[in-house]
């Protein structure tokens, strides 16, 4: 159940008070910035080891059309330490639609009494002293806790505090167009396997079957997702403000994509990709149900500083072609809780976050580096293209 307003506001200080004022808490507490997948998973693991968690999320929009995630078996049990629910709140394993995974994790967080969720709340800054860490919201509130977890994605504000000398993820020189349709809306016969990775010149298409909205995996009742890597539209990304100064600022929604670009994509799909993927792409274009996510990458020099740490895409941003950003985020959440739980004296947050970093920094760097090869193959001149 989402906690009451008074509970949600515990730990919030007024605009005029100094964030440096100490705020000892018992039980221990965490502020998690960002309530997407990495934030939800971290909140669940931290609640499992006894922390009171406040989540702050700037957005009320919940969609990432087409993106598919590999979900490990027993994920929710690992995160919560409890048997997974059945039915609508379960997190099914295997390839799943981003929106379904998000909905299931969000339900689990809402059912956890140690987690409170505030949205929309935009965090603008973070800080710490020897007693506590805090974030500042856009209306000037200071929200204190024993630790702050930045789960605020590729353009992380919390990263500016943890890595002030290198806070930005850099644009990799390509966009991924994404779409999702019901298989029953397509006429073409199904593809013989669940996943296709196709290359044509400088383009790459990942296309896949996902369970239908009712969880069905029977042919004809599934959904068809696709992601089309395209290094040829960087002018549009810059002109629309989706990329500014080689930093990814936002995803292009259908309304941002000019009719001419849709026409070109439909024509290119016709020439390049086989059915049923071609049909799925052209249908999404006709419906205007396509988004374009410019891809950035971030190789972290560190993922923790004192009482503040990073998880998920805020910590390490690999090319989506690695297919591993989600499982790395789950590993972050598990490692963070293990480090905190291992803090037997119950007051050495700094030592716990050092242990978290020691566990997760090297694998995170390895993951990002593994995606660079693909990025260089599709956009050899990077953002300069
Ligand atoms: C197109 C695409 C395809 C992908 N495909 C795969 C795949 O096949 N396999 C895989 O494993 N991974 C994939 N990933 C990566 C995977 O989705 C992420 O690694 C994973 O979901 C973790 O994301 P996150 O929660 O860290 O960040 P995000 O999903 O970016 O969430 C960050 C959250 O923080 C909020 N936020 C940001 N700033 C603030 C602020 N200042 N104040 C408050 N809230 C804030 C945002 O609104 C958002 O909700 C893909 C990613 C993309 C973009």
Image (tube, rainbow, N blue to C red):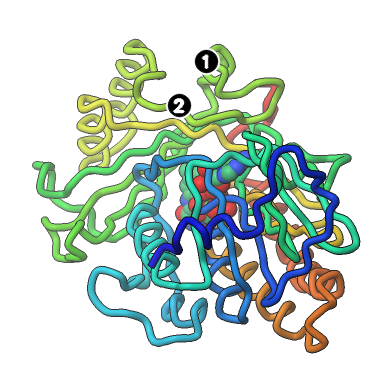
Q: Earlier in the sequence, mark 1 or mark 2?
A: 1
Total numbered labels placed on residues in the image: 2
Mark 1: few, some, or many residues within 10 Å (few <14, many ≥20)? some
Question: Would residue 86 be found to the left or right of residue 51 on screen?
Answer: left
Residue shown at 60%/70% (left/top)? 52
* Camera-nearest residue between 62 and 302: 62
| SS category of the residue bearing label 2 | loop
Looking at the image, residue 87 lies above or below residue 82: above
Please identify the quadrant where the N terminus is shown. Answer: bottom left
The quarter of the picture where residue 164 lies is: top right
Q: Position of residue 22 (x, y in %)?
A: 83, 59
In the image, which disc is placed on residue 184? Answer: none
The quarter of the picture where residue 100 lies is: bottom left
* Camera-nearest residue between 24 and 188: 24
Q: Position of residue 24 (x, y in %)?
A: 78, 68
Question: Which residue is identified by label 2?
Answer: 252
Residue shown at 40%/57% (left/top)? 102
Mark 2: few, some, or many residues within 10 Å (few <14, many ≥20)? many
Residue shown at 69%/25% (left/top)? 246
Question: Which residue is identified by label 1?
Answer: 240
Does any portion of residue 50 appear in the rendered image?
yes
Question: Would residue 163 be found to the left or right of residue 212 on screen?
Answer: right
Does any portion of residue 202 appear in the rendered image?
no
| CA distance separating discs 1 and 2 | 8 Å
């Amino acid at each position: 159940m989402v906690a009451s307003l008074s509970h949600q506001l515990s730990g919030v200080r007024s605009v005029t008070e100094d964030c440096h004022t100490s705020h000892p808490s018992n039980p221990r507490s965490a502020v998690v910035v960002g309530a997407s997948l990495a934030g939800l998973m971290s909140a669940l693991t931290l609640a499992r080891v006894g922390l009171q968690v406040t989540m702050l999320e700037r957005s009320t929009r919940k969609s990432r059309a087409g993106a598919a995630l590999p979900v490990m078996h027993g994920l929710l049990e690992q995160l919560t330490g409890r048997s997974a629910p059945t039915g609508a709140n379960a997190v099914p394993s295997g390839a799943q639609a981003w929106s379904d995974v998000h909905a299931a994790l969000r339900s689990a967080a809402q059912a956890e009494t140690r987690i409170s969720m505030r949205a929309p709340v935009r965090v603008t800054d973070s800080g710490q002293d020897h007693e506590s860490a805090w974030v500042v919201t856009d209306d000037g509130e200071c929200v204190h806790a024993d630790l702050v977890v930045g789960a605020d994605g590729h353009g992380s504000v919390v990263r500016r505090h943890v890595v002030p000398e290198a806070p930005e993820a850099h644009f990799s020189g390509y966009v991924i167009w994404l779409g999702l349709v019901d298989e029953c809306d397509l006429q073409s016969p199904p593809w013989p396997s669940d996943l296709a990775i196709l290359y044509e010149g400088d383009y790459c298409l990942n296309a896949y079957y996902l369970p239908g909205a009712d969880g069905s995996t029977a042919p004809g009742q599934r959904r068809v997702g696709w992601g089309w890597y395209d290094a040829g539209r960087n002018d549009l990304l810059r002109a629309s403000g989706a990329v500014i100064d080689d930093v990814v600022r936002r995803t292009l929604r259908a309304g941002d994509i000019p009719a001419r670009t849709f026409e070109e994509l439909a024509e290119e799909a016709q020439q390049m990709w086989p059915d049923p993927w071609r049909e799925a792409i052209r249908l999404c274009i006709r419906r205007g149900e396509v988004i374009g996510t410019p891809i950035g990458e971030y190789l972290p020099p560190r993922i923790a500083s004192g009482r503040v740490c990073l998880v998920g895409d805020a910590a390490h941003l690999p090319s989506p072609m690695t297919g591993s950003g989600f499982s790395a985020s789950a590993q972050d959440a598990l490692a963070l809780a293990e480090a905190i739980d291992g803090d037997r004296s119950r007051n050495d947050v700094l030592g716990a976050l050092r242990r978290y970093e020691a566990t997760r920094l090297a694998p995170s760097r390895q993951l990002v580096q593994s995606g660079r090869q693909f990025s260089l193959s599709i956009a050899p001149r990077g953002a300069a293209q």
